[in-house]
Image (tube, rainbow, N blue to C red):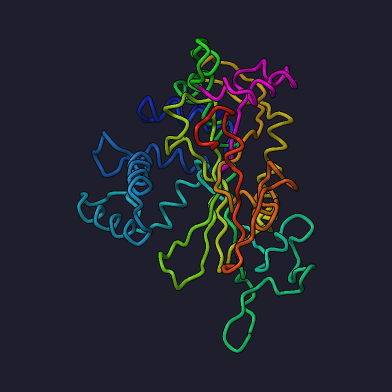
Amino acid sequence: MELTKAIRIGHFTENLRKQLLMLVEISDPYEFANVIGDGDQPLYPGCRKYTKLSALVKLYNLKAKYGMSDVCFTKLLILQGDLLPEGNTIPAFMYEAKKTLCALGLSYEKMHACPNDCILYTKEYEDSTNCPTCGISRWKEGKDSILKKGVPAKVVWYFPPIPRFKRMFRSHETAKSLTWHTAKKSIDGHMSHPANSPSWKLLDDKWPEFGNEPRNLRLAISSDGFNPHSSLSSRYSCWPVILVTYNLPPWLCMKRKFMMLTLLISGPKQPGNDIDVYFEPLIDDLKSLWDGIGGVYDAHNGKYFILRAALMWTINDFPAYGNLSGYVVKGYKACPICGDDTPNHKLKNDHKICYIEHRKWLPINHPYRR
């Protein structure tokens, strides 16, 4: 109550005051007390337009929007400090800026992983120093094969989606957009939103208590690997895992600010079919969302409700589909639809398998069937 009162009487802009009041209920009050001080502290003596917190948020938004590196952002902070009058409160290092913004909940979890993609060092393996499956050390090897204790051999970054879902509903406009599929969707018989698809309707029919609440989220997960170094000689792999919220209107659901990065799997080689090991924390959160998360505030209706979510689709290319599903996408039975009846033919000279008879799926009177 004292923290809430401090926000109400502090010298904040009205927009920042609303955001702070929303965040205070879901943040650590001890960490949040520092945010109150930064939000009430002017950027420099006599400044009325910006506080330390609001200036940092705007600068960090520019960093994220234009892909600015940490080194470049640190140089920008130093330049800003030199340009502003004496006594300014702008931090001089990236670390200080991150420490301030982490109290707003913009944090992540770093989880140690086995280099051979066997386990994550969480739960029952949290204190283990060697992988129970392959026996390899948890720590990185230095020169002369000396282990660097405290330096993990492989790290995975996890960005919990539940706090971000809660904050989506704390924005009046976003909370209103999340129910667009019920209020504004087309009923002219044409598909204009995933809500018109058979899978969406099947979910509503099979679990009516889920479908009757339009605020319940329908999600898709997208993942693929790429080489961040843009070098053909390097086999280094990076796999981002992104959640897409299909409750939003079609022109918003694929916007950058609504596509949630939840996992970043980075390593010297691709995880392959063992990628399911890294999905463990995300699956745990998705199970919690299916059971229901209470105390979520809907700013549009001004009420608290129980938020539920269902994972309905995956978005990926065919090789990534094989990694995520565990299905074999190469060889004689590569088609997940045909299975054992996959039409295949092995070339005599190239020893490759090609897939024929695909025209049988065309309509019976289609000219290409001939």
Please report the residue visible at 72 percent of the width from the left and 57 percent of the height from the top: 122
| Residue 75 falls in image quadrant | bottom left
Q: Give the residues in magenta.
A: 193-222
Q: Position of residue 110 (x, y in %)?
A: 59, 57
Residue placed most toward the observer, 292 or 200 = 200
Residue placed most toward the observer, 142 or 367 = 367
Q: Is residue 195 magenta?
A: yes
Residue found farthest to the front: 370
Q: In this image, 310 relative to 191: left or right?
A: right
As drawn, 27 above or below 192? below
Q: Is residue 199 magenta?
A: yes
Is residue 15 in view from this perspective?
A: yes
Please report the residue visible at 30 percent of the width from the left and 43 percent of the height from the top: 43
Q: In this image, 127 relative to 363: left or right?
A: right
Please report the residue visible at 70 percent of the width from the left and 51 percent of the height from the top: 327
Q: In this image, 347 relative to 64: left or right?
A: right
Residue placed most toward the observer, 303 or 115 = 115
Please report the residue visible at 55 percent of the width from the left and 36 percent of the height from the top: 369
| Residue 26 falls in image quadrant | top right
